[in-house]
Amino acid sequence: MLPEINLINLGEDNYSIEFTYLFNKPQKDVWSFLTDKSLMKKWWSDLSLIDEIEVGNHLHYTDQNKNEQHAEILAFDSPRLFSFTWSMGFIKIELSSTNHSETYLAFQYWVPLITDQSHHELSQWILNLELLETLLNNKEAIDKKSRYYQIDQYVEKLIKEYI
């Protein structure tokens, strides 16, 4: 199921793109998949190299144009907050739970400019989080290519309303 995406104009061409996921798993389990180096590569397929997960270090990944990029870790507060630079902005992932078996993941992507290509980055992140959910719940693998296409159609339509 696709998340409800909120695009918030912060003024002067600054935007916050936000959505939440609910995982039927304890927060410690979701946090492990988000930050354990061996588990991260299972859901974040473009991730190529991970420094130690701490503020100031970097995540190395391949972008949609097959260029090597790096993201600087801006905040890391186990087991609830993980933030890093991304493209022209930054991403913040925050976990919270109301009980021991459910975890809310709040995703925020701050970007100074929404372009006609912004939907690709956001679609990839939604797909990555769906892969994370699949792994956490030991579900059958999803067809990444067709699922990405479905997500991208949805996100592109939404973002076109803002550009």
Image: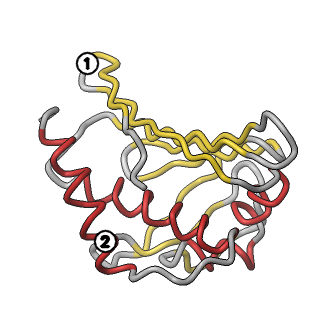
User: Residue at 26% across / 50% down in the picture?
Assistant: 155
The answer to which image quadrant residue 158 occupies is top left
Q: Which mark is residue 64?
A: 2
Left/right placement of residue 35 relative to residue 3 reads: right
The N terminus, quarter of image: bottom left
Mark sitting earlier along the chain (1/2): 1
Question: Mark 2: which amino acid?
Answer: Gln
Kindly tell me whether residue 118 is visible in this rendering. Answer: no
Residue 123 image point, x, y percent: 34, 59
Question: Mark 1: which amino acid?
Answer: Glu
Above or below, 151 relative to 157: below
User: Residue at 32% across / 70% down in the picture?
Assistant: 148
Above or below, 151 relative to 81: below
Residue 32 image point, x, y percent: 79, 63
Q: Residue furthest top?
A: 11
The answer to which image quadrant residue 92 occupies is top right
User: Residue at 50% across / 38% down in the picture?
Assistant: 108
Residue 71 image point, x, y percent: 54, 58
- Crowd band around label 2 with a 10 angstrom C-alpha radius: few (<14), some (14–19), many (20+): few
Residue 97 image point, x, y percent: 77, 38
The C terminus, quarter of image: top left
Instruction: Out of 121 and 90, give the one closest to the viewer.
Output: 121
Q: Which mark is residue 12?
A: 1
- Crowd band around label 1 with a 10 angstrom C-alpha radius: few (<14), some (14–19), many (20+): few
Left/right placement of residue 4 relative to residue 140 reads: left
Instruction: Out of 112 and 34, give the one closest to the viewer.
Output: 34
Check disc 2 and report its element: helix, strand or loop.
loop
